[in-house]
């Protein structure tokens, strides 16, 4: 009974979050130039058509925060066909510990915040073959990041890293999820992939069919992406909109 009530409440909250998402994501017009409106590609990716099982540590997040995390998953699922990635994030519920199963993603909390980088979330991935293909991953959210909408923004951003996108601090405001955050717990109203994000993920998965990049060599299989390192890429490449 309690479990059914919790699921019902979560579904209602997810619906609330979905109805209040910003329309700014669809406001990009014209070509998407890397470093201007679009992030560069070449980061971690789940395998094409992966069904990623997502677990959230319930003791780390309240029900409303969890609902907004699930909304971020849904927002990326909605563009799966447009990105040609075929990747879907499937919310599985609570996890007490990190899930190291194949195609598993765990969302948890830990000390992350870096004031100089405005960095409050972090992606950690495990690649069995030391390449860009993720076998399992963690998204770590700083304990001081508590605003549900800011958590939604940060999750949408980190999921972008899961889909092959790099940060783009110099990109125009509103053009990409991969821009920098202004402050802890301040929503940036970027809650779903923009047309430029979609186009670049499509490029990332097109490239993945041709070659698989090697991941950074650090002497072990667990690689950390702080997720907020600036990328100064002004390549004048026109990316067609989907």
Image (cartoon, rainbow, N blue to C red):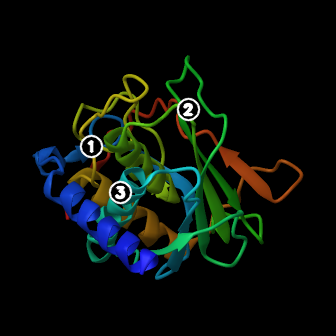
Relative horizontal placement of residue 195, taking residue 118 as reference (left or right): left
Of the image marks 2 and 3, the number of the one nearer the N terminus: 3
**Mark 2 secondary-structure assignment:** loop
| Residue depicted at x 42% and y 81% | 1
Which marked residue is nearer to the observer: mark 1 or mark 3? 1
Relative horizontal placement of residue 145, taking residue 106 as reference (left or right): left
Of the image marks 1 and 3, the number of the one nearer the N terminus: 1
Which marked residue is nearer to the observer: mark 2 or mark 3? 2
Which marked residue is nearer to the observer: mark 2 or mark 1? 1
Of the image marks 2 and 1, the number of the one nearer the N terminus: 1
On residue 166, the disc is none
In this rendering, the answer to whether 39 lies above or below 52 is above
Q: Are marks 2 and 1 in contact (CB under 8 Å)?
A: no
In this rendering, the answer to whether 232 lies above or below 92 is above
In this rendering, the answer to whether 53 lies above or below 62 is below
Q: Residue 138 at what x, y percent from top left? A: 63, 57
Residue indicated by mark 3: 200
Which one is in front, 20 or 22?
A: 20
Residue indicated by mark 1: 190
**Mark 1 secondary-structure assignment:** loop
Residue 47 shows up from this direction: yes
On residue 229, the disc is 2
């Amino acid at each position: 009974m309690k479990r059914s009530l919790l699921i019902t409440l979560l579904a209602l909250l997810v619906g609330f979050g979905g109805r209040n998402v910003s329309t700014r994501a669809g406001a990009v017009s014209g070509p998407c130039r890397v470093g201007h409106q679009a992030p560069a590609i070449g980061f971690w990716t789940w395998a094409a058509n992966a069904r990623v099982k997502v677990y959230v540590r319930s003791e780390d997040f309240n029900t409303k925060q969890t609902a907004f995390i699930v909304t971020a998953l849904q927002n990326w699922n909605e563009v799966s066909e447009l990105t040609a990635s075929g990747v879907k994030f499937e919310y599985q519920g609570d996890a007490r510990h990190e899930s190291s199963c194949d195609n598993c993603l765990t969302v948890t909390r830990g000390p992350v915040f870096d004031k100089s980088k405005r960095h409050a979330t972090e992606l950690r991935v495990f690649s069995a073959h030391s390449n860009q293909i993720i076998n399992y991953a963690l998204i770590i959210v700083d304990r001081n990041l508590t605003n549900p909408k800011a958590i939604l923004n940060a999750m949408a951003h980190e999921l972008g890293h899961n889909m092959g996108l790099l940060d783009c601090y110099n990109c125009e405001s509103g053009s990409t999820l991969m821009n920098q955050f202004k402050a802890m717990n301040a929503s940036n109203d970027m809650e779903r992939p923009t047309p430029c994000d979609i186009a670049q993920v499509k490029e990332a998965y097109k490239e993945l069919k041709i070659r698989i990049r090697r991941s950074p060599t650090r002497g072990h299989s667990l690689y950390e992406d702080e997720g907020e390192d600036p990328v100064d890429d002004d390549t004048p490449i026109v990316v067609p909109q989907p």
